[in-house]
């Protein structure tokens, strides 16, 4: 299968008052079309740092990120934003729904920016996250889990090849968290999008095709879940 997202020898160092802090020390990753990945690791191990690099929201100290054939690490922020649209969907903890727009308008926002929102596609996606009945609701009248599911639908709107999700369930109770992850995996599956999901939840990770563990700057254990008896690699 085609590689839709790749990272090679990815290093990210942050300058700190005590000297440079190396968070990623050479991360390699290859995500193929339609695969689901769960990335786990201790707090502070660099999971969000990695996802920001994969999303083209931050640039590596060295090493590279590719969306298909596009070398993301060479792009300036505006060029990365343009390249991202229609290729990479993001579901981050700060989901930034626009308060004055309905759920449906939030989902079709990328189309509105280009002047031509696809209402039918927006409604299909809301249905795929079980929110068809709330299409006209504004965010403040939705629960936290419902808002996250709107963010999932919005991330899928442009038919991205891959969706990056950073702990989208962190602030929810278990039942709502399960509903969000369920919706993400089902909707992405229906759309053929690969998913890279950062999670602390073992049960969520067990749902992914592949699992990887980030610790001490390295990503290990990209085994298939069905073969997995132990964590790590
Ligand atoms: N802009 C920054 N400047 C300096 N250090 C940073 C910066 N961003 C993150 N760090 C540090 O890098 C390390 C990794 O942070 P990151 O947010 O990627 O961890 P994480 O695995 O996502 O943690 P969590 O599970 O708590 O969300 C931490 O030690 C953090 O303090
Ligand atoms: Mg994090």
Image (cartoon, helix red, strand yellow):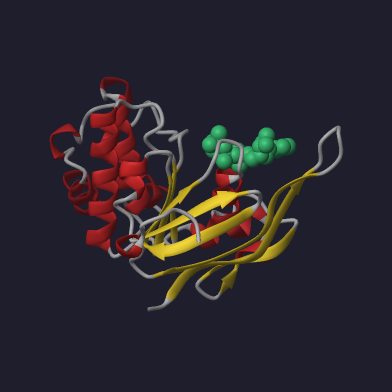
Residue at the extreme front of the image, as rendered: 229
Residue at the extreme bottom of the image, as rendered: 1
Q: Nearer the viewer, residue 144 or 154?
A: 144
Q: Quadrant of residue 137?
A: top left
Q: 166 left or right of 195? A: right
155 to 224, vertically: above or below: above
Q: Nearer the viewer, residue 212 or 131?
A: 212
Q: Quadrant of the N terminus?
A: bottom left
Q: Nearer the viewer, residue 130 or 60?
A: 60
Residue 197 position in % (x across, y down):
41, 49
Residue at the extreme top of the image, as rendered: 141
Q: Quadrant of residue 46?
A: top right
Q: Nearer the viewer, residue 79 or 175?
A: 175
Q: Residue at x 53, y 62 (%)?
A: 83
Q: Residue at x 86, y 39 (%)?
A: 19
Residue 140 position in % (x across, y down):
32, 21
Residue 34 position in % (x across, y down):
33, 66
Can residue 170 be seen at all in this image of the molecule?
yes
Q: Residue at x 28, y 30 (%)?
A: 174
Where in the image, quadrant-wise, is ligand 1 located?
top right
Q: Residue at x 21, y 44 (%)?
A: 129
203 to 145, vertically: above or below: below
Residue 13 position in % (x across, y down):
75, 49
């Amino acid at each position: 299968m085609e590689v839709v997202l790749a990272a090679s020898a990815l290093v990210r160092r942050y300058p700190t008052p005590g000297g440079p802090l190396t968070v990623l020390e050479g991360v390699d990753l290859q995500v193929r079309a339609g695969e689901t990945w769960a990335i786990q690791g201790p707090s502070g191990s660099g999971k969000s740092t990695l996802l920001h690099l994969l999303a083209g929201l931050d640039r590596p100290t060295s090493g590279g990120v590719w969306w298909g054939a596009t070398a993301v690490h060479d792009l300036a922020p505006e060029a990365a934003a343009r390249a991202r649209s229609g290729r990479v969907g993001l579901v981050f903890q700060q989901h930034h729904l626009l308060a004055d727009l309905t759920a449906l308008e939030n989902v079709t926002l990328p189309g509105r920016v280009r002047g031509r929102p696809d209402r039918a596609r927006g409604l299909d996606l809301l249905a795929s996250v079980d929110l068809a009945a709330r299409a006209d609701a504004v965010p403040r009248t939705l629960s936290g889990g419902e808002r996250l599911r709107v963010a999932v639908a919005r991330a899928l709107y442009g038919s991205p090849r891959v969706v990056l999700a950073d702990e989208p369930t962190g602030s929810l109770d278990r039942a709502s968290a399960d509903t969000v992850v369920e919706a993400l995996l089902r909707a992405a599956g229906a759309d053929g999008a690969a998913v890279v999901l950062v999670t602390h939840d073992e049960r969520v990770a067990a749902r992914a095709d592949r699992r990887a563990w980030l610790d001490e700057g390295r990503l290990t254990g990209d085994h298939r879940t069905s073969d997995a008896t132990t964590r790590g690699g």
